[in-house]
Image (cartoon, rainbow, N blue to C red):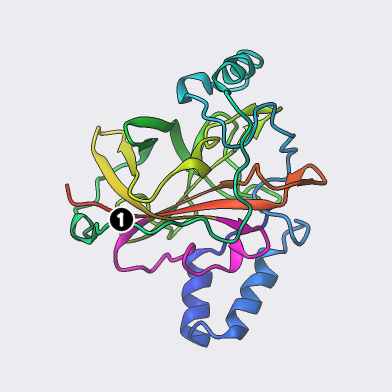
Amino acid sequence: MTTPPTRRQRWRDRKRYRLTTAVLAAATAVLLGGGVAAGTWWTTQQDDEATVSPGTYVPPSSIMPTSQTPSSTTTTAKKTSKKKTSSSTSASTSTSSSSSASALAPAVQAPPGSPTRVQVTSGGRELVDASLGPTKLDAQKVLAPPFGTAGWYAEPGWPKPGHKGASILVGHINHGGNPDVFWNLPSVKLGDLVTVTYGSGSQVKFKITRSEAAPKTGVPKDDTIWDWDNPKPVLRLITCDPGTPLSGGHYEGNWVVWADQMVS
């Protein structure tokens, strides 16, 4: 995994270069630094080939922290698998969305405190239900939350969900071959709901507007993802793409979801 840009870096780069090709090249050099091999993204730990076919639905209730249930998750997941499917590895899997602009709005007061849980629902079915904690770059400049939880990018200057700008949520797709908290994320559809709950009990809801496979080399350079100065509160969720090959213990692709905040 490579180093995401800090807000200060993004602001300085935008002011100086106005998002020219030069600034993207400079950002790439920074993002591929910190001792992380160029071309990798997301984690320096082994992804491991999943024991469940990519695209197979696994109930979030069966996805427990690995330290609690190292084998039961795999057993439950296999029972839910009816056929082998594969995630798309194309550059884009977005489909045409129905008109939902009226349900999106930037002028919603952001809750105080910190987010503690993220849930994603699709047609009444729960895809993600995970605890959510602050996640910063480690000593190797890698952004990776603990297995069994999701993380919000908590480096100084980056917005929390519901605050103006792009808030970044990250989670693992699997661990030790077992599905992890973002296993079902590539199955989302446009219009699906993301709910972020704060410690106070306040909730912020987002509607998914885009969901795509993305090459790991391109994610750090994609300004639609690292859009910290967006005037509206928006959300980005990132994980690995289990439908891509493993190379050196890492999936070759990412999966990224874009979402806009909804009116309460």
Residue 100 appears left or right of 121: left
| Rendered residue at 58%/20% (across/down) | 77
Name the residue type under label 1.
His
Q: Position of residue 61 (x, y in %)?
A: 46, 20
Against 67, is 146 above or below? Answer: below
Residue 40 in the image, given as x and y percentages of width and height: 73, 55
Total marks shown come to 1
| Residue at horizontal 60 percent and vertical 63 percent from the top | 220
Q: Give, as a single range, the part of the protein colored magenta.
A: 213-234
Q: Is residue 39 above or below residue 171?
A: below
Q: Nearer the viewer, residue 172 or 187?
A: 187
| Residue 27 quadrant | bottom right
Q: Residue at x 45, y 31 (%)?
A: 130
- Quarter location, residue 102: bottom left
SS category of the residue bearing label 1 = loop
**Residue that appears at 26% across and 39% down:** 203
Q: Is residue 228 magenta-colored?
A: yes
Give the residue number, with chain letter if any, for mark 1. 163
Left or right position of 242 against 8: right
Is most of the magenta stretch helix, strand or loop? loop
Image position, residue 249 (x, y; %): 79, 42
